[in-house]
Image: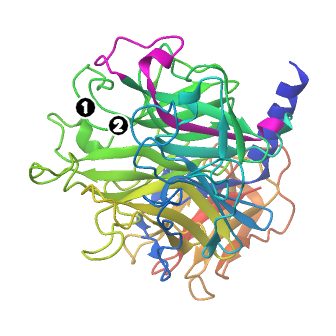
Amino acid sequence: MNLRLCLMALFALHVHAAEQTFFAFDDVNLAWQHNLKLTLVPATKHPANPVLRSGPPSSADAGHAILYGTVLKTGDTFRMWYLGMVEKEIVKGQAPGWWRPMCYAESKDGVNWTKPELGLMEFNGSKKNNICLIESEVHSMTRVNDFLSVLYEPNEPDATKRYKCAFIAHMPIEDVKGGRSKIGPNEKRWGATITATSADGLTWKCVGDRPANAGGERFEVSGLYRFGDFYYTTGQLLSPWAWRADGSDVGRVTLAYRSPDFVNWSQAKALSLARTGQLAEPPVKGQQGHMGAGIWNRGNVLVGLNGLWQDAEQPPPKGKSWNYGVHVDLGLVISNDGVHFREPVPGFKMIPRGKDGEWDDVAILQGHAFVNEGDKTMIWYSHWDTGGVLEHMDIGLATLRRDGFGYLSPKVEDNDAHVVTSPFIASEIALNVDGVSDASPLNVQLLDHLDHPLDGYTATVTQRGLHQTIAWSKPLPQDKRIVLRVNFATKSAAKLYAVYVR
């Protein structure tokens, strides 16, 4: 194994070992439950919404500012990559269709954003704008058309590649070196998956001289993350490019491709997520998933938001866009293996679209935009005007209790309850818990991996907290697989949001 692969392996091991999170809605790590129910908690929209608005006429984001993008926090700065819109071809040689430039914004609090003049890309005769520069031997590869996901790997040995991204460019088919699959119609322009790398997240270079999906099928990529040994891109397709296991037609589902090195990508794909209605026979009208999932990588688990697509009730009136009347809310998904996602409660609206007349009232879109800050989990999202007028296409913020997507509590209050975790090795265990007190404690105990109680490892939790470390009477067993059992007393008011093991 060369030095770079050794370093990447050590980094992955460190991330995995640092802290694992067992969320209340994780029915793999918290599979064994007695008399417990899951209550998911919708996020609260920020009163200042939209927190980032589209720009003035002639600016790069005058058409809209849309979070087909990512928010990260590095140091004390929130960094946002989002897409603007240019509604006509203004750059010589660009691919057909709208150009959505990769735009950049910064904030110190995640609420108040600035759009710095980067001076990298000439637009309307000036470089005084916030457009990131994307370079490639093939010009049409640099023309972002849809969706954008940015990944930051601070321990990447090659400093010029610490930022990675994936996006869609609708390339002329003659520009696609390596060809394309015969699956699907013969298109004049192609949904190309483009990957790029950067030292600073502002100046980018496309990887290679062809799309990541060259030689394969078109792919509407929307996600990028590293999990275990592979990088993954996720996104949506529908028939004829996607189908159910028996080959029958399917609506919008989430697919995944993978790469061991961010250069060579699989042609084989995995069906990562289909809403339950898409797997029925016949499929339930309207129950599609829009653009895969906005991903938050928590090391041992992926959490995300999936678009809950609802078809229009009637065909669009003459002169209206094809998606007129479509509505989208955002629902919660989770994956334990980086490939397969599921809805903990199918159809639950973690962030619902706004009421009629509100800025986000038609449809909303997920980004890869999650940050834990203080006692809050911050989630950014944007509006999508499916009516085609492109109004109020701005970016908003929603918040939760830190890691407070949902909690476990007794279903029948006159009965005791408990949950048993999957095995782990740890030197510290903490709970994200509310509702506990001296009168309503949680009693915890350690078991071995065969569910046998370990002598001397019991404790009582009476203090609520976001990261309440359990005080054991002696150090935890070293290099031994153990299990945590959390016991709820009769009539307990406790709410268990997460278990953290370090």
Camera-side residue of 352 and 215: 215
Q: Which residues are magenta?
A: 160-188
Foreground: 253 or 321?
Answer: 321
Which corner quadrant of the image does residue 96 belong to? Answer: top left
Q: Quadrant of the C terminus?
A: bottom right
Residue type at mark 2 is: Val
Say left or right for 299 vs 416. Answer: right
- Residue 237 appears anywhere in the view: yes
Q: Secondary structure at mark 2?
A: strand
Asked whether disc 1 touches disc 2, contact meaning CB atoms under 8 Å apart, the reply is yes
- Using the numbered discs, state the Cα–Cα distance from disc 1 to disc 2 in whole angstroms: 8 Å
Residue 55 x/y as whole percent: 51, 66
Residue 488 appears in the figure: no
Q: Is residue 171 magenta?
A: yes
Q: Amino acid at mark 1?
A: Val
Residue at the spot of label 1: 250
- What number is the disc on residue 227? none
Which of the pair 329/274 is nearer the observer?
A: 329
Q: Dot 1: within a 10 Å radius of its alpha carbon, few (fewer than 14), some, or many (20 or more) residues?
A: many
* Above or below, 416 relative to 150: below
Q: Residue furthest front?
A: 125
Q: Position of residue 361 (x, y in %)?
A: 30, 69
Residue bearing the label numbered 2 = 253
Where disc 1 sits, the SS reads loop
Q: For the view shown, which residue lies furthest in the right direction?
A: 3
Residue 134 left/right relative to 363: right
Q: Quadrant of residue 427?
A: bottom right
Is residue 209 a member of the stretch shown in magenta? no
Quadrant of the drawing holding the N terminus: top right
Q: Position of residue 75 (x, y in %)?
A: 80, 63
From the top left corner, tell me how far across and down residue 168 is, in percent: 49, 35
Q: Residues within 10 Å of mark 2 (few under 14, many from 20)?
A: many
